[in-house]
Image (tube, rainbow, N blue to C red):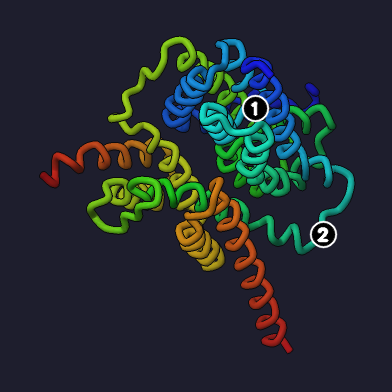
Amino acid sequence: MSRELTIWLLIFAVGAITYAARLSFIVLFARREMPALLAEALKHVPVAMVTAIVVPAIVFTSPGTLGLDAGNPKLVAALAAAAVAWWRQSAVLTIAVGMGVLWLLPYLVR
Amino acid sequence: MRAHFSRTAFFEGVRDMSPMLLGIVPFGIVCGVGAIAAGASPVAALAMSMIMFSGAAQIVATQLLAAGAPFAVIVLSCLVVSLRLIMYSAALAPYMRPLDRRWRNLLAYVLTDQAFARTIQRFRDSDDTSGNASYFLGSGALLWVVWQLSSLVGVFAGKVVPSSWQLEFVVPLCFLAILVPLLRDRMSVLVFAVAAVAVVVLDAMPLRLSMICGGLLAIGAGVLADEARARTSRRGTR
């Protein structure tokens, strides 16, 4: 199989998978009632999944290396940003403080 | 289609999604660069970002392709990184019920981590089906357009954003801005804690399965805690 053909087949195969995943439960429960236990469980999806996305991006300094101390600039920046997000629900301010700390920290510590 | 469209809500969605673009742009560029590096033609690279429309799947596909992995392995890996989309689909399903099929099909296409995280609270807080759907469409549409444009930059201009800027860190910061305000009750803090510990402990799992497994464990813990609380309150009233 040529490289180009492989790539196109891959695009359509994976495209079908991502779209099927996105549509799956929306279609499944378009007409029928959702079981109570499932509905109950789904309430926790936002916190659980957003945490699972965010935490590794903060606590790992490189793949497989945990940095749970002040020597990890991403951790310090994330804590500062989290404090801002707690007091002010502003994404812009949270990003500004987080990136500000991330960029300035190496100069401050030195 | 027009029956559910609210212009005001659409542009509220666009506005609320815009801070996230700072993290989306570098990611989209990297995906464009990755596709070219894996041997895709510019047209295929752009088709990839339109048809897959998933940074995680695109990165996995192009990296494995470049590494010469077998076709089936690439598809399976992309399936694994797409599992979280099924959870978003399930969480949004009850709110999509009142919509007609064309709306549901369209909104599913623009369902991403960002669009889900950004809009789920509004779906929960408001009964305005049309407003919520339009808000979601606005968030999703902006992300879609910017994703394609940044892929285009990656394909034709290469990596124009230096890694030293660490702009990829904007992505977790955006999610943090959404996550932190959700942690106002004990149940959410419990789910957060379980997810945080589990995702780190399970980090060695292949294909970033730690993310979906950590999330599922946290959801399970939340359900058990809900049950326990319901049981004690029942006992209390007796």
**Residue type of the residue flagged with mark 1:** Met
Quadrant in the picture for residue B233: bottom right
Residue B102 as seen in the image, left or right of residue A19: right
Q: Residue at x 48, y 55 (%)?
A: B204
Chain to which mark 2 belongs: A
Residue under the image location 31 percent in, 46 percent down = A74
Percent of width and height locating residue B232: 66, 83
- Most extreme residue toward the right is A31
Question: Does B58 sit left or right of B179 as displayed?
Answer: right
Q: What mark, if any, has residue A35 been given in the picture?
A: 2
Numbered disc 2: secondary structure: loop
User: Residue B64: image x %, image y %?
Assistant: 55, 32
For the C terminus of chain B, which image quadrant?
Answer: bottom right
**Residue in the picture at 50% in, 59% down:** B202
Give the labeled residue for mark 1: B52
Q: Are marks 2 and 1 in contact (CB under 8 Å)?
A: no
